[in-house]
Amino acid sequence: MEHFQLKRAADVKQALDMATAQTSAASPANTPSTPSTRFLAGGTTLLDLMKLDVERPAQVIDIHRLPLDKIETLDGGGVTIGATVRNADLANHPLIKTHYPVLSQALLSGASAQLRNMATTGGNLLQRTRCVYFRDTATPCNKREPGSGCSAIGGFNRNLAILGTSDHCIATNPSDMIVAMTALEATVHTESPQAKRSIAIDDFFLLPGTTPERETSLDAGELITHVTLPAPMPGNRSVYLKLRDRASYEFALASAAVVVTVSSGRIEHVRIALGGVGVKPWRSHDAEAALLGRAPDAPAFRAAAEAALQTARPQSQNGFKVELAKRCIQHALTLATQTA
Ligand SMILES: Cc1cc2nc3c(=O)[nH]c(=O)nc-3n(C[C@H](O)[C@H](O)[C@H](O)COP(=O)(O)OP(=O)(O)OC[C@H]3O[C@@H](n4cnc5c(N)ncnc54)[C@H](O)[C@@H]3O)c2cc1C
Ligand code: SF4
């Protein structure tokens, strides 16, 4: 583990000033993929990666005391979630449990109670892949060392992605929370000394392409301040279903977040996002299109599942995920519409 400077920020301006002072210093490690500054929230991802020498920031800015820990309703009925809100508090908040159950279910399916008590909204958005080679500095990995190669292609890839992959990286995004947020069409709000930005969650995460080291549209030193969710559609039902090797404390092999409104026996509105199978939380517009206007029945759900996986590109060990993800979508839709 490298030496680093630990600083504690009291407010957003101070955090940004500290980050700017470091990012403007001459340093080769000064890009969004290898930043010289990292913000420290719950620390459940960052500290592990620093101990493994995967992340080597020169400066760590502790932001957990920033006043970004509120969950509040918005004019118009949506909700705003501060970046330092803990995963456990978000999952158990009455507003979320009542109006966005898919988000509560996704959070509670992740990690362990102790981790959820530490982990934050901003940190969960930026957790890194669980690809074993990314965490092993003795092996080539384009995400960790651009240009070094991808050990997972042809190597151990059972847990990795089948949607959105490139010849440079096939890593899965491991988060449950952001799959639900994608189905809910969340917006990520950020602040830097230059500007405040609001980024649709689907645009926030990038495909690996030829630059897998760059995972999001955040710039170096840019701080996530909060996430907003639009008002829930009247009468909607939502479900998060996670399939994994064991019942708890395990990442998804495949998961589905569905938000669906049925009216007069037809699907009037639906959003579907997948986890465990994509390089980023995978919104399936094709599956949604296959469902719109149809009766909520098994043939419609199968058609949606087929549409969602039609571009799947399995690797040597993860072909089973294609059918697993299809069944996950079908079952999640069945659960969501059973109660409708
Ligand atoms: C054993 C284990 C099991 C797990 N299982 C699951 C699981 O099943 N499902 C799941 O979804 N997750 C799982 N996780 C991941 C866990 O959810 C994340 O580690 C956690 O959400 C990260 O949040 P944090 O606040 O601790 O982030 P930190 O570790 O503090 O930060 C993570 C990254 O985000 C950056 N960051 C944090 N906040 C901000 C901000 N406001 N603005 C800009 N950058 C920021 C940091 O600089 C760092 O790069 C697991 C983790 C562990 C260790
Ligand atoms: S899949 Fe991505 S993270 Fe894993 S070894 Fe290949 S480049 Fe690295």
Image (cartoon, grey):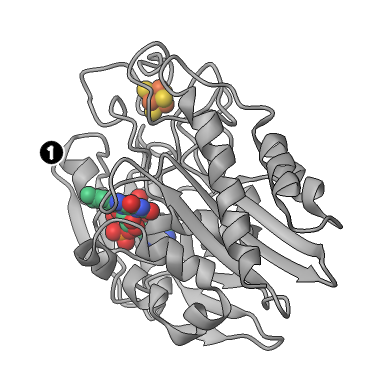
Residue at the image position 40 percent from the left and 48 percent from the top: 23
Residue at the image position 83 percent from the left and 55 percent from the top: 294
How many dots with numbers? 1
The image shows residue 15 at horizontal and vertical percentages of 37, 67
Say what amino acid the circle numbered 1 marks.
Met
The image shows residue 134 at horizontal and vertical percentages of 31, 29
The image shows residue 17 at horizontal and vertical percentages of 40, 64
- State whether residue 170 is above or below residue 304: above
Which residue in the structure is indicated by mark 1? 1
Does residue 53 appear to the left or right of 209 in the view shown? left
On the question of residue 236 being in view, the answer is yes
Foreground pick, 66 / 99: 99
Label 1 neighbour load within 10 Å: few <14, some 14-19, many 20+: few
- State whether residue 232 is above or below residue 213: below
Quarter containing the C terminus: bottom right
Residue at the image position 23 percent from the left and 24 percent from the top: 137
Give the structural element (helix, strand or loop) at label 1: loop
Foreground pick, 228 / 332: 332
The image shows residue 143 at horizontal and vertical percentages of 41, 28
Does residue 327 appear to the left or right of 148 in the view shown? right
